[in-house]
Image (cartoon, grey):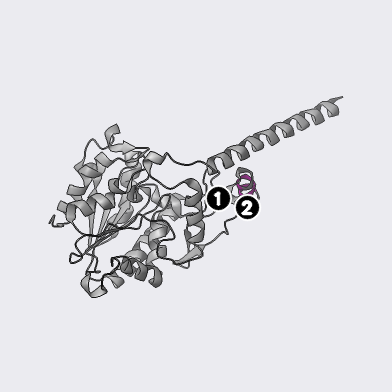
Amino acid sequence: MRIIKFLKLIFINLILLILLLFILEVLSFIKLAETYNEKLDVYNTFEYFKYKRIYNKTRENNPYKFRPIEYRNPHKRPILLFGCSYTYGHTLKDNETLSRKLEDYTNRTVINRGFNGEGASLIYFQASDPIIMKNIERSLIPPKTKEKDVNTDFEYIIYTFISGHPKRNFLYKINIFDRYFNLRYELKNNKLERRIIKHTLLHSSYTFKLFYNFINNKFIPSNTYQELVFKAEIEESFKLLKKYYPNSKIAIIIYPDGQNDIYINKASQILKDFKDVTFIKVADYIPDIYDDKYWLYNHPSPYALDKLVPIIAKELNINKN
């Protein structure tokens, strides 16, 4: 009798587990099919993943669906932005983003190469590919304009850093709430090496991710290792960018992201070793940055960016006119 009860209990638990996984799968594909509010004027989720995938297969000028370029004074040296959704402008319209507001304020072209869910890995991926960098330079030239009539020497290269960026450098465990695989690197013999997992529809499955993690038994690397990879990505990226644009200046905006202040300070210390870099710690200039008015869906609001842009221009000595 005890064996029968035991078997019944196992059977019931298996049924419950299957039901739970089924619910997770339903939620998984419902989430995949979500679209943002049209009023926000952002790309729907299906397009988002389509462009994420093809980035591993092509070097086209805009495979990531980066923000469109608003051409300004062609004789002024342009500005190049890197970063994550804070740079890209998650949920914001094109005219509400950091890049557009910086363009309006400085009257110079600003290229926005940030994207949701990314960070240092995306900077290094672009900087280490001469074709991509050439495409960035070509994108500065408006249609029906000769290259010689446009200043393509970036005056500033600006990276927006949040404390979560070092954590985005692992590819050992698949987060069941991630909808995609981002670009990832690891350190081998003190050199960055790219890790690639082919994206298939199966990767959208919660069940697949759970079993993947269980079978591989690989866990998130230590914070120290994450920080080492992150630092290597930034260091190598800056070297490459300075090689392309030796006259450019580099700046890092350190933006709070809702994390504990202690961790933000600890993470931002990683960047302090870099020389000839201008640091702008947003909380030093906007003490009440944690107020709700500065945030929209856990990202910088247009109000926050309106406050930030004049600070950036002043600290970097970028002429307004």
Tag 2 residue = 216
Q: Are marks 2 and 1 in contact (CB under 8 Å)?
A: yes
Specify start and end residues of the magenta stretch as a single range: 209-214
Tag 1 residue = 173
Q: Is residue 313 above or below residue 261?
A: below
Please say whether residue 203 is visible from this viewpoint.
yes
Whether residue 211 appears in magenta in the rendering, the answer is yes
Q: Alpha-carbon neighbours of circle 2 within 10 Å: few (<14), some, or many (≥20)?
A: few
Whether residue 28 appears in magenta in the rendering, the answer is no
Rendered location of residue 222, percent (x, y): 47, 50
Cα separation between marks 2 and 1:
8 Å
Query: Where's the C terminus, which quadrant?
Result: bottom left
The disc label shown at residue 247, or none: none
Residue type, mark 1 in image: Lys
In terms of depth relative to the viewer, which is nearer, 146 or 103?
146
Rendered location of residue 63, percent (x, y): 44, 60
Rendered location of residue 70, percent (x, y): 27, 57
Marks counted in the figure total 2
Rendered location of residue 121, percent (x, y): 42, 58
Q: Earlier in the sequence, mark 2 or mark 1?
A: 1
Q: Which residue is located at x 19 percent, y 43 percent?
A: 285
Query: Where's the N terminus, which quadrant?
Result: top right
Taking the image as shown, residue 53 lies to the left or right of residue 65, namely: right
Q: Which residue is located at x 35 percent, y 60 percent?
A: 234
Please say whether residue 221 is visible from this viewpoint.
no
